[in-house]
Image (cartoon, rainbow, N blue to C red):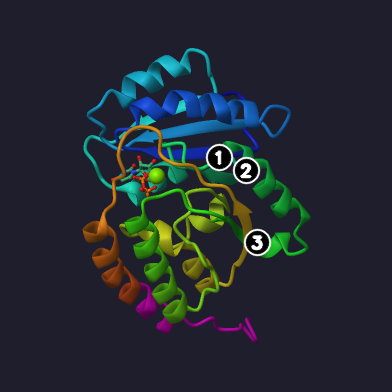
Amino acid sequence: MEHTPQLSIVIPAYNEAACLGPLLGELNAALAGGPTYEVLCVDDGSTDGTLEVLRSTRERLPQLRIVRHHSRSGQSAALWTGFGRAKAPWIATLDADGQNDPRDLPRLLEARDASPEREELWLVTGIRRKRRDTLLKRVSSRVANAVRGRLLRDGISDTGCGLKLMHRARILTLPRFDHMHRFLPALVMRSGGRVLTVEVGHRPRTAGTTKYGVRNRLFVGVVDLLGVLWLQRRTTHPIIEEEL
Ligand code: UDP
Ligand code: MG
């Protein structure tokens, strides 16, 4: 791509061969007449033909860039691989399974543009109005969000939504660790950045399987939560009074 796009869309994908083709078509339609954009699909070491689907989609979607991990490294790692390669000043993220509706993306862009705090704005995060997941996932997510919200005081009711919009250079200054994507609002606030929320839709997964269960979400989440609490406690923002 010759010119710097206005928006980079980063999509982490692990074994999402059946979902990606339709999703990329929807995304293209949702952004018609909008900002110039590139789509960075990060194949997190898939074994189901995801790479082949991406390759063939690229023939009709020249804005598509493909990066592939040698082996599965996790959603956060895939997102960071995309963040580091994104060319636009703003990045949008979206899950590859189609559970996020690309038609919500323009609303995140509008919220950013209408914000009086745009200079301090780091992150616009989607809040899923009605989760279309299994009962077990909805309940465990509700518990995790409640505990996280109480301890981190980030005031965000749903941090796991894959649909987000963020300022690239600012986000790249955040600490990087596995599962950090669920703590983005708290990490941004810790750095003094502003976070906006926008209610978005959510759709059932139509193909493929979820990559998370109680074991690799809830239990791992406790360790991550303690880590982020520690980071919050150990943060100072000195005000420079004089510099000669
Ligand atoms: N994902 C990934 N690597 C992983 C786990 C997940 O790239 O190790 C991607 C996955 O393909 C999807 C997104 O992260 O695009 C969210 O995962 P999933 O839909 O399974 O999460 P859920 O919606 O069930 O919480
Ligand atoms: Mg999903």
Question: Label 1's element?
Answer: loop
Q: Nearer the viewer, residue 102 or 131?
A: 131
In this picture, residue 88 sits left or right of residue 214: right
Q: Distance between the residues labelled 1 and 3?
A: 23 Å
Q: Which mark is on residue 101? A: 1
Q: Which residue lies furthest to the bottom in this view?
A: 241
Tell whether label 1 touches label 2 (CB within 8 Å): yes
Q: How far apart are marks 3 and 2 (CA)?
A: 19 Å
Question: Label 3's element?
Answer: strand
Q: Is residue 229 above or below residue 104?
A: below
Q: Which mark is on residue 104? A: 2
Q: Which amino acid does label 1 sit on?
A: Asp
Q: Residue beneath label 3, please?
A: 121
Q: Distance between the residues labelled 2 and 1?
A: 6 Å
Q: Which of 53 and 218 is in front in this view?
A: 218
Q: Is any part of residue 86 visible from this angle?
A: no
Residue 111 on image: x %, y %: 71, 53
Q: What stretch is highlighted in magenta?
A: 228-244
Residue 129 on image: x %, y %: 57, 55
Instruction: Check residue 107 for magenta coloring.
Output: no
Q: Residue at x 65, y 31 (%)?
A: 31
Residue 5 on image: x %, y %: 62, 33
